[in-house]
Image (cartoon, rainbow, N blue to C red):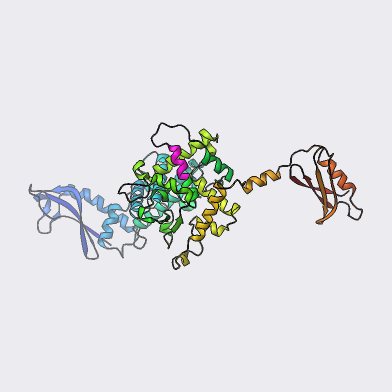
Amino acid sequence: MATFRITVQKQRTDGYWPVYIRVIHHRDSVFMKTDKMVDNKGIVKSTKEVKDPFVRKSLDIIIADYIERLNKVDTSTWTVQDVVQYLKEGTSDVCFSDYARQYQAKMIQEGHARNARTYELAYQNMERYAGTNKVMFSHITSGFINGWIKSLSSTARAKEQYPVCIRQIFKQALVDFNDYDTGLIRITTNPWPKVKIPKCDTPRHRAITMEECRAFFTAPLPESDRKFPLAELGRDVAMMILCLAGINTVDLFYLEKKKFNNGIISYERRKTRDARADRAYFEIRVPNILNSVIEKYLDKTDSPFLFNFHSRLSSYDSFNANVNIGIRQICEKVLGIEHGKAYSGYTFRHTWATVAQNECGASLAEVDFGLNHAHKTRLARTYVKIDFTPAWELNEKVVEKIFFTEENSREHIEKKDNHFERFSFKQLIKGTLYFRGRIISTVEDVGFNNVEDVIKVLMKNLPDTIPTRSLVQIRIENKDKKQTKDYTRSVK
């Protein structure tokens, strides 16, 4: 157990002695400075202990509090420095807001600037909910967190993303401030066992059809008085995304000149490079259709970056926002698409993947490879020199399908085929009746006014060998409109 003495050390030039509390523990000692002072009459010169009754009375109260607090913990393994730290800070609250800002700054220093931005938005949102930018750890209770999460319920992603960020900061703070080996606990609350973080909404599929893609890129740009119209920027960057295997805008923004050689762009995907052993390295060959667009934005200065986006926009966030605004302008002002359904840069990444799989016959693994996604063989990727030509060939197929054919998207074809319009007696109709997959009867003629007329003729030809209450299948084709629809009927 530590012991305490009220003492002085050195006399000041004005003749007064600053008073200290000397903490002795395991034969080591530390002097804790107080706000008291005494003159020569207030000390025992031989021992330098304070005898002034008023000073001693005041400090004895503090020492009594120290002893009471130390009696509640096991100090047998503590050093005297641990004792002093506990007495100074053991019950003082810690500012979560200050710690969160330090945590975010460290993320930026370690190269996680994009993730750091999400963490910043998370603690700023929580501070707005709390009504202060000095949120203390003692304020962060389960009731407070659950109330904050409830305020995020109308958001699609933030209701999960923000609490996860705050929880991660909190967990690291427990490691930094609490020493469970010695019992030095500064953060005494932990709300997370009583907090259930909701899942973010499943995002809607952002891909568009090849027809919609062609309409977007052939749409006339809306009028603008800007030297660099945002609609033109949005259209051109969307073209880059679509024709470079769905490359992300952040990777376009940070592409370097030295990584563009012989028509091949190489880069590390910034979103996942720190989480993958292969640094998310990828190479993509620029298709010829993109050459003029690439040339338009090449940086002609001494900048290390390939494109001049940096000279026009201050940051990646600004670049991405302007690209999306430009894309939205074309959607709303030219194509008549309502605000909530306008495209974004991600639309064309998703479209690349959808066209590659649905229209070009690529497997999901091939699509993942082309999009530079992490794969179950990611360890092998650190050993093998990857041949990226399969991705280049798939990219060329996607570009060919969209820009150099008039083919309809499979989704569009399916929707059209499934729509069976009413027919007239002038149209040639064919009806076929099946039982257990075998054709039982057929009819092909004009003069039918509706579906039931065809079914009545087919059911009249039903043989007696088919059991009653069995189901038969009927397929009716409008030969003139090339439309088909299937029905079932129960045998009476």
- Residue 142 visible in the current orientation: no
Left or right side of 93 for 326? right
Estimate the x, y position of residue 176 in percent, counting from the top left. 34, 56
Q: Is residue 230 magenta?
A: yes
**In-front residue for pair 224/248:** 224
Left or right side of 489 for 323? left
- Residue 184 visible in the current orientation: yes
Please state the total of marks drawn on the protein image.
Answer: 0
**In-front residue for pair 83/401:** 401
Left or right side of 297 for 65? left
**Segment tinted magenta in the rendering:** 227-238
Residue found at x 40% / y 50%: 114
**In-front residue for pair 427/84:** 427
Estimate the x, y position of residue 32 in percent, counting from the top left. 21, 54
Left or right side of 290 for 422? right
Q: Quadrant of the N terminus?
A: bottom left
Estimate the x, y position of residue 90 in percent, counting from the top left. 32, 53
Which of the 4 quarters of the picture holds residue 366? bottom right
Q: Magenta part mainly helix, strand or loop?
A: helix
Residue found at x 42% / y 47%: 294
Residue found at x 49% / y 46%: 346
Q: Residue furthest bottom?
A: 383
**In-front residue for pair 400/57:** 400
Which of the 4 quarters of the picture holds residue 23? bottom left
Estimate the x, y position of residue 429 in percent, counting from the top left. 81, 43
Q: Is residue 10 magenta?
A: no
In the rendered view, would you say 386 is above or below 491?
below
